[in-house]
Amino acid sequence: MPLPTRPPVTLQAARAKAGIAPGVPSPCISVCEMDEARLACKGCFRTLAEISQWSRMADADKIAVWQLIEARQVPAAAP
């Protein structure tokens, strides 16, 4: 049986969910499991370093991580 698919993790969706909360929202969706091949969380697509540093990052750095998260979800082009 195929695994259910979920919508991509995006900054726009996280902001909509966070409402009027200040700052850049966390990408965490409470699916905390590491993908050893990608070295990133299967839920939020962050690396361990990004996860551990998130609370200390400036908003500009968080937005840069969000850009990486969104790029990590784009399927690689076939050779």
Image (cartoon, rainbow, N blue to C red):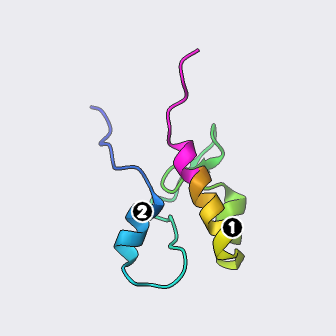
Q: Nearer the viewer, residue 46 or 62?
A: 62
Residue sitting at x 55%, y 29%: 76
- Check residue 12 in the rendering and tell me which mark sits there, or answer none: 2
SS state under label 1: helix
SS state under label 2: helix
Q: Nearer the viewer, residue 71 or 41?
A: 71
Q: Which residues are magenta?
A: 69-79
Residues at circles 2 and 1 in contact by the CB criterion of under 8 Å = no
Residue sitting at x 33%, y 48%: 6
Asked if residue 31 lies in the magenta stretch, the reply is: no
Quadrant (top left/top right/bottom left/bottom right) for the N terminus: top left
Residue sitting at x 58%, y 54%: 67
Asked if residue 70 lies in the magenta stretch, the reply is: yes
* Secondary structure mostly seen in the magenta stretch: loop
Residue 54 can be seen in this image: no
Q: Vertically, is 37 above or below 13?
A: above
Q: CA distance from mark 2 to mark 1?
A: 16 Å
Identify the image quadrant of residue 4. Answer: top left
Q: Amino acid at mark 2?
A: Gln
Mark 1: few/some/many CA within 10 Å (<14, 14-19, 20+): some
